[in-house]
Image (tube, rainbow, N blue to C red):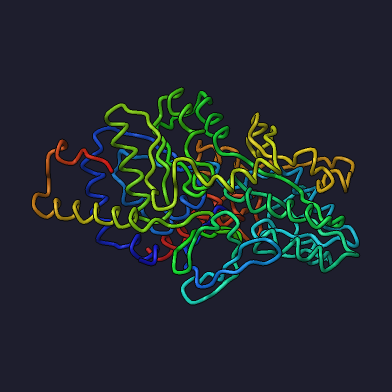
Amino acid sequence: MKYLAEFRDAQAVQAWLERLRRTVTRPWTIMEICGGQTHSFLRFGLDELLPRDITLVHGPGCPVCVTPIELIDRAVAIASLPGVIFCSFGDMLRVPGSQSDLFRVKAQGGDVRVVYSPLDAVTLARRNPQREVVFFAVGFETTAPANAMAVWQAAQWGLKNFSVLVAHVRVPPAIEAILSSPQCQVRGFLAAGHVCTVMGTSEYEPIARRYHVPIVVTGFEPLDLLQGLTMCVEQLERNQAEVTIQYRRSVRPEGNPAAKAQIERVFQVVDRAWRGIGVIPQSGLGLRPEFAEFDAEKKFAAADILAEESPECIAGEVLQGHKKPPECPAFATRCTPEHPLGAPMVSSEGACAAYYRYRRARAAAG
Amino acid sequence: MCLGVPGKIIQKYEREGLPYAQVDFGGIAKEICLAYVPEAEVGEYVIVHVGFAISRLDEAEAMEQLALLREIEAAGEESPWPSASQESETP
């Protein structure tokens, strides 16, 4: 068991598709929350093999995409300061701010570094006591334990030259925001397997009950996605609305208690603005007051910059599942991964990037 | 961003109070923090995200998923259109 090839077997995919076809009797719209799942659906071409009655819509589970433009602008401003080493996951570098992006700051001589783990940024701070090291702490609940550990370690070692620019987001309030919209067509959800690996399933129970939607915690490989969809459709066809786990090899109902405890120690729930969507109450994590000295927004207080989105970009509608990327007039013409107008065209989890990468190639080949 | 990759623990050790492991990803070994799954053993697979193991993979659950699949395939071969009631059990 290597946990990859076994879950990509083509014959097995056909068997699940067959079972799914036999299960569906009516049209259903189902949202996959996580951008990683969106990419798997498109990369393996699964969305094109699904029964016609199933409409997949892509959710907001792309932290790079939903990080507000104001924070990108703030990151650009901090990274441009002399003496700062600005550390980030690679995905954030090309995300367009109002005027610039981190990649351009780097090209112009700013010390912007891509790190694999947030602990790498802490190590950089220890090795460079004369420099200010700032880490761009973005991500959903999956990433929060790692980022919390970086802050925790910096506190343990009494580092004075380390801080984090926090843009953490939480999935359950976003699901509620989507379900509360009068435009919402979504009848069932595939929840994000790695978010729930950390958090467990308890936050999803009240949502399933209140909105009467099945929520199936699903993995990322083709067989996971097809089994998750089948489990979701089986519930829909029986008018059930329960939280179930497809991705059982990784997700336990209680989540990962040690990881959750570390999140709680360092972060607290706050309101958070989502790029293209707006403020969603209680949908973010911010540093607890006892870790305020590690807050880069406080440390590098700057006048608010007037944030400006591209007027052409429809990222907000894409992120809420109202529109698909090819419906955007700028898609693959004025907006490409090299010259993005919005964040979903940049991120490895962005829906626009997925369509650009996998659908254009197919259209060209066909 | 929530990308999690399965890898196999090949060595465990501690540094500055935190548990770490060398984890093999199909031939490439990386240092991974085990603070959130300290009980994971050498030889076990873990899901790794931004340098941290976030879960131990449960082989029995994985085998069960794949076995279920073989049942579906077998059912499909016997009769291409079984009734819904025969097929309605979900794991």
Q: Nearer the viewer, residue A149 or A225?
A: A149
Does A30 appear above or below A49?
A: above
Which residue is at the front of the view, A183 or A329? Answer: A183
Residue at 26% across / 44% down in the picture? A20
Q: Quadrant of the C terminus of chain A?
A: bottom left
Vertical relation: A278 (above or below) A251: above
How many dots with numbers?
0
Q: Nearer the viewer, residue A163 or A348?
A: A163
Residue beneath the point at 80% across and 52% down: A163
Asked whether, in this view, residue A108 is left or right of residue B11, the answer is right
Position of residue A178 measured from the top left corner of the image (x, y, whole percent): 53, 31
List x then y, in percent, for residue A304.
Answer: 85, 40
Residue at the farthest left position: B78
Q: Residue A169's spot in the image, x, y percent? A: 63, 41
Question: Picture quarter containing residue A117?
Answer: bottom right
Is residue A310 among the parts visible in the rendering?
no
Location of residue A339 with respect to A109 vertically, above or below: above
Q: Position of residue A291 (x, y in %)?
A: 79, 44
From the viewer's perspective, tell me whether residue A166 is left or right of residue B7: right
Q: Could you say which is closer to the camera, residue A123 or residue B79?
A: A123
In the rendered image, the quadrant that contains the N terminus of chain A is bottom left
Furthest residue in direction bottom, as rendered: B27
Residue A226 shows in the view: yes
The residue shown at (64%, 38%) is A276
